[in-house]
Amino acid sequence: MAAISYSSRCFLCCDLSFLSLDIFFFRWLCRQTLSLTLSHSRTRILTDTKTQRQTGRAAQLANIQAAQAVASIIRTTLGPRSMLKMLLDPMGSIVLTNDGHCILREVDVSHPTAKSMIELSRAQDEEVGDGTTSVIVLAAEVLGQAEPFLRQDNVHPTILVSAYTKALAQALEILEDQAIEVDVQNDSAMMKKLVESSLSTKFSSRWNDKMVEMALAAVLTVATPMSHMVPSTKENGYIGEENGGASTNGHSHRRPIASTFQEMEVDIKRYAKVEKIPGGEMDDCQVLKGVMFQKDTVHSAMRRRIENPRILLLDTPLEYKKGESQTNMEISDDQDWNTLLKLEEDFVENMCKEIIALKPDIVITEKGVSDLAQHYLAKANITAFRRLRKTDNNRVARAVGATIVSRTDEIAESDIGTQCGLFEMRKIGNDWFCYLTECRDPKACSIVLRGGSKDVLNEIERNLQDAMQVVRNVVYNPKLVCGGGAVEMAIGIALKRIGQQIKGVQSGPFQAVGEAMEVIPRTLAQNCGVNVIRTITQLRAKHASAYEEAQESGNKFRCTWGINGVTGEIVDIEELGVWEPFSVKVQTIKTAIESSCMILRIDDIVSGSKKQG
């Protein structure tokens, strides 16, 4: 009987223990459900009901798709065989171009990542002026290479970003090995090849010779040297010896420190003005050895052609001084009125006498010129122009060696510009233009563009601006790298070989950057219409063999094989003569990879409708 009661108690205890476990699990489940409900309710309270939100992997994959969609718009505009895009802007005018930045500037997108990609193109255009299409295509490909790691391997974005950052540092070192230096002032043949490489992908490539001459002449005209002292920070006089002068790939990067160096100031935006005049032919385009502006003389009796003129620039009105506040005067005698008029005339006459005393031939002011002042200046055989823009006046001052004066009683002989060789008025169409040419050592210039229509002129101006930016970049940093996808393929091969030696989860993303670099030669081959797989495979084999030979011999890896953008054949780019500025390529790779890292770190996108009313 005792045994029966004991077993009954055992079963009863077991039932109670299971019951307590069920109660504990039920309480835990209730707490979790309540916390999830509260979190969702808090989210609904913080955000509007119309707000759309993407989090986690969904947000990251959506960002990658948006970046690839932007790149697909301009992918066909890369290379010499690029296609044109016709865009209709909000004002109803047509834009016909293959410039990546110009296309994306007119595209209206709503996705925040797509807007961020368009900002990359704008930043690239402002910084170096070229490579706007390449940076978008490369950034989208780098992001696309991250998609398998996020979707299948479930790799954390932080690991991807860390691997991408290491690959960027390594890519810049490899790029440094691929670069060569150029003498900007003396090696004119190399500079012409550089500008031809930039213009060959543009609409104006049929006028390459003319555009090359104009771009080189304009930039070298406005370039002015500046000397700076650089303090030496190494006792042995070398930079780059923190790690024994060796880079991570075993190549030395020691360069001597100079006590002084020449830095060039090239302000194209302020001192190289493009004047677009519809009509004429492309052969009529020229870079003036001086400046021009669209103005006519203030008096018909003034001279319209002067050799070796003395030019005075003013920033003051040649008319009676008006009161800054409203003034009321009561005149009771008619003589008082005549006295007031006489005071105004004396004031203007005194200003003209101060100008005439220095015997200038031309007077240009940013303000107005009264009829009385015109009379005195014409009587003294002085040609005058009024209401010239401030930017144009600064350009004239730099070209003719004059100083802009704000008060007529402070004019000195040193303020007169005497570097101009010829002044003449020319009529083009229905407008009169003032030409100040044959200047001695002008540091400013005007670029006259002629063309059949406004659309053609606008596109030629964009192409010329890109070419001038390319020359400016080389003046700043006189280094060149091979074009035609040769540099990108060399970096890609080297990164994949180096990535194979990396252990751990970062090996795959590191090699993915090298794989993404191949998008530039691949896109060039696609736009040429050749067999892409066969061409890229052959190009990859040439670079791989060059890399193996460099590793065996202990030399730095440098391979110049790339794709001829016109025929699609694999050629030696150095022999073909297709070059790109080193600074443009550095900026392209940096911007593409760094922006990809930033976009990969986004895990939450909240977008909602704006409030109505």
Image (cartoon, rainbow, N blue to C red):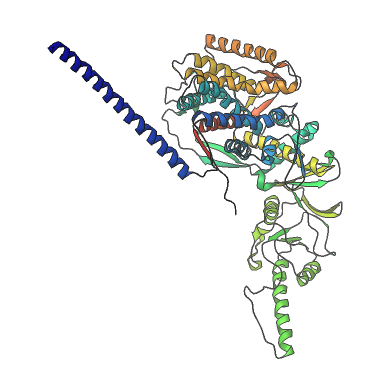
Q: Which quadrant of the figure has residue 367?
A: bottom right
Residue 34 in the image: x percent, y percent? Answer: 38, 36
Place residue 11 in its image quadrant.
top left
Image: 165 above or below 377: above
Image location of residue 121, percent across then percent down: 62, 36
Q: Is residue 89 above or below residue 183?
A: below
- The residue sitting at the bottom extreme is 332
Q: Is residue 426 left or right of residue 311?
A: right
Q: Residue furthest left?
A: 2
Q: Can residue 442 be seen from the camera position used here?
A: no
Measured along the vertical axis of the image, is residue 62 above or below residue 458?
Answer: above
* Image position, residue 334 (x, y; %): 74, 89
Residue 298 spot, x, y in % from top left: 79, 64
Give left or right: position of 240 versus 582.
left
Return the residue nearer the eye: 451 or 376: 451
Instruction: Look at 70% across and 37% down and name the residue there.
Output: 103
Image quadrant holding the N terminus, namely top left
Q: Is residue 314 left or right of residue 21?
A: right
- Which one is nearer the viewer's eye here, 299 or 67? 67
Instruction: Please give the name of the residue rendered at 81% of the width and 69% of the height, measured from the top-left corner.
Output: 379
In which quadrant of the rendered image does the C terminus lie? bottom right
Does residue 580 appear in this view?
Answer: yes
